[in-house]
Image: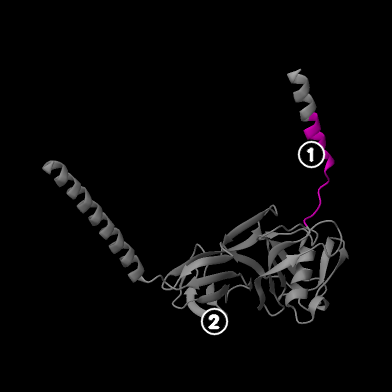
Amino acid sequence: MKKTILTVLCAALLLGTTAIPAYAADSETVYVSIADENGDLVLPYQPVTVTDIDGDGALTINDALYAAHTTYYDGGSDGYGSAQSDWGLSLTKLWGVENGGSYGYYVNNASAMSLADPVSAGSYVAAFVYTDTAAFSDTYCYFDAQQITDGVVGDSITLTLSAAGFDENFAPISYPVAGAEITVNGAATGVYTDENGVASVPFYTAGTYTISAHSDSQTLVPPVCLAVIGENAPQTADYGVWCLGGAVVMLGAAYVTARKERSYEN
């Protein structure tokens, strides 16, 4: 009898899970970065609310880029275009630029097959207009962190800059970008990545900063790391806590000593 009940329950569970169709979420928040035809960072990983604007039943790169334009581009959705091509759903206009299809886009620093590739909550979508439309030498690169929220005044932020590429078998690879100068809010810092792509940038003022990089030896698609730098906690607070803790310990010790003295007297 127990086996029969268990079998029925398992069958019901299986039917219940297989009978429920998979639908795309109504909306999700993703982060979008866009670089224009001059190689300028016009949108540094800003949040957008993505909905299924094209009605294909999924939340995709196309939906995310459309939402980014309606939210941040001066001309709204007029600055964006997409259409079916031999390579699937493809860009025809990005940030108001129409250049015959010379664009690139990545999701979480991985090259996408088409604009129909899916995105999910918290995805990072980076799109750019090629500045070199002859040799297509623009190199997509990225930091090992896209956002830092716990920076402290007086500390340095250490980042690793990598480039995306392909090996001799056209398999995707990444490699360090050496000799790139770090920029903060568009200004040069005089800090360069080492042979491993690593650089450390100090911050002396609280605020929100856009960290990027450029190179004189290669054309880099500007990487993005948004850093929030907070004020350093005052040492007096820590000292006060330490003093309070010490006072409590001393009072506790005095209490125990007094109890012992009373017991001895009795």
Residue 154 pos. (x, y %): 41, 73
**Secondary structure state at the residue bearing disc 2:** strand
Residue at the outermost front position: 266
Residue 145 pos. (x, y %): 56, 63
223 with respect to 87 (left or right) = left
* Residue situated in front as seen by the camera: 136 or 8: 8
217 with respect to 234 (left or right) = right
Residue sitting at x 11%, y 43%: 265
**Residue that badge 1 annotates:** 17
Say if 36 sits above or below 20 in the image: below
Per the rendered image, the range of residues in magenta is 11-25
For the C terminus, give its image quadrant: top left
Query: Is 22 covered by the magenta stretch?
Result: yes
* Residue situated in front as seen by the camera: 121 or 195: 121
Residue 144 pos. (x, y %): 56, 61
Residue 222 pos. (x, y %): 62, 72
Say if 62 sits above or below 13 in the image: below
| Closer to the eye: label 2 or 1 | 1
**Residue that badge 2 annotates:** 187
Alpha carbon separation for disc pair 2 and 1: 54 Å
Of helix, strand and loop, which mostly describes the magenta segment?
helix
Query: Is 219 covered by the magenta stretch?
Result: no
* Residue situated in front as seen by the camera: 120 or 82: 120
